[in-house]
């Protein structure tokens, strides 16, 4: 069981771009103008077997309301398919990205 789970995680982490294609499409449907960025260990290429996939969804239409943000996150996880459990989603407005996240991200990969 542990070996299978580890192999599953490895497959997803090695192929993360293919899973995020669906996230990009769904994010654009829900939010219109959107930029999806991966950061953290996956972006740096030094992920470990216990890594997650840090995903920043940047859009002027990002909901302020936590419940609405949760609904968007749920739809994006559904679009990610089997990779959903590994996603660490951050849904933010551009100013939140610039004023907070950008200061702490060392490497980012723009997905769409």
Image (tube, helix red, strand yellow):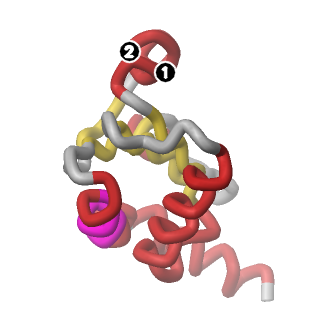
Task: Answer with left or right where residue 55 lies relative to residue 3.
Answer: left
Label 2: how many Cα within 10 Å (few below 14, some 14–19, many 20+): few
- Which quarter of the figure has residue 16? bottom left
Residue at screen point 44% across, 73% down? 80
Is residue 44 in the magenta section? no
- Which quarter of the figure has residue 23? bottom left
Q: Nearer the viewer, residue 3 or 27?
A: 27
- Which quarter of the figure has residue 73? bottom right
Q: Nearer the viewer, residue 43 or 19?
A: 19
Q: Position of residue 9 (x, y in %)?
A: 58, 71
Label 1: how many Cα within 10 Å (few below 14, some 14–19, many 20+): some
The boundaries of the magenta stretch are 21-27
Residue at screen point 34% across, 32% down? 108
Q: Secondary structure at mark 2?
A: helix
Mark linked to residue 98: 2
Tag 2 and tag 1, C-beta contact below 8 Å: yes
Q: Is residue 111 visible?
A: yes
Q: Nearer the viewer, residue 71 or 2?
A: 71
Q: In which quadrant will I find the N terminus?
A: bottom right
Image height of 81 relative to 31, above or below: below
Q: Is residue 45 visible?
A: no
Is residue 24 in the magenta section? yes
Residue at screen point 64% across, 58% down? 49
Image height of 33 relative to 25, above or below: above
Task: Answer with left or right where residue 72 lies relative to residue 43.
Answer: right
Q: Which residue is mark 1?
A: 101
């Amino acid at each position: 069981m542990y070996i299978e789970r580890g192999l599953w995680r490895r497959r997803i982490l090695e192929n993360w771009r293919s899973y995020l294609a669906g996230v990009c499409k769904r994010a654009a449907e829900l939010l219109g103008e959107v930029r999806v960025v991966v950061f953290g260990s996956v972006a740096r290429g030094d992920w470990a077997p216990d890594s997650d996939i840090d995903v920043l969804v940047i859009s002027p239409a990002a909901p302020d309301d936590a419940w609405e943000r949760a609904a968007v996150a749920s739809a994006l996880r559904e679009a990610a398919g089997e990779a959903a459990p590994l996603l660490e989603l951050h849904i933010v407005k551009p100013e939140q990205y610039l004023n907070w996240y950008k200061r702490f991200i060392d490497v980012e990969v723009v997905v769409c």
